Amino acid sequence: MSVIDTVQLLEQRTQKAAGLIVMLRKEKAEMQQKLDSLVNQPAVDPTLAQKLESESGLNAELQTKLAESTVSNGNLSSELQLMKKQLTELQDKFDLVNNHNAELEEYVQKFTTSNKLIEESINKAMDNLSHIEGLDDIPLEAAMADELSAADDYTSGGALNGEQIENPEDL
């Protein structure tokens, strides 16, 4: 290759390099304009930013409510434990009252049965006495007649005629 060919080749390469430089400068200027326009634009959509702020505030409120609920839950748990303890105590008292009630019912049943047996015995004795002949013909002493009359009056409801029964200890 001759010197002229080499010079021509260098000239072509220089022109190509100059063309590339011009083209790169143009591209740089366009990129700079795009960059400047993007720098002046907000990075985030304003409505999106406002919504994010709103949601952040709501999140903070919910966090506060959650903390309050946790405290309230703790209070309710302690109240529940106290109520369970009271329920157990009341159940124990209720069971005790039921046991006493059952004992009393058993006592009433025994008392009623005993009263019926006593009543039957008295009725049989009275029936036997009514069959004994000549019992009415036996004279009673005057003092006993008064006592029998008072006893008969008392059992027939005469004690409830407004007379007040006095306790012998009060006399």
Image (cartoon, rainbow, N blue to C red):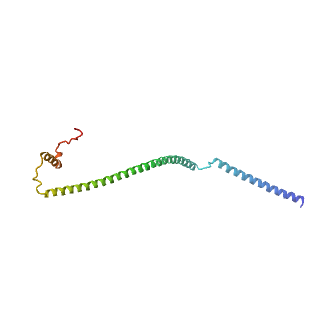
- Report the residue that reaches farthest toward the top: 171
Residue at image coords 84%, 58% = 9
Task: Please tell me in which quadrant of the rendered image residue 119 appears.
Answer: bottom left
Image location of residue 67, percent across then percent down: 52, 47
Number of numbered discs visible in the structure rendering = 0
Along the horizontal axis of the image, is 94 left or right of 75? left
Q: Nearer the viewer, residue 39 or 125?
A: 125
Image location of residue 146, percent across then percent down: 13, 45
Q: Nearer the viewer, residue 51 or 87?
A: 87
Image location of residue 74, percent across then percent down: 49, 47
Along the horizontal axis of the image, is 106 left or right of 159? right
Image location of residue 154, percent across then percent down: 17, 47
Residue at image coords 15%, 56% = 129
Q: Nearer the viewer, residue 100 or 90?
A: 100
Along the horizontal axis of the image, is 60 left or right of 121? right
Quadrant occupied by the C terminus: top left
- Report the residue that reaches farthest toward the right: 2
Residue at image coords 34%, 51% = 100
Q: Nearer the viewer, residue 62 or 26?
A: 62
- Report the residue that reaches farthest toward the left: 137
Q: Is residue 147 above or below residue 110?
A: above
Quadrant occupied by the N terminus: bottom right
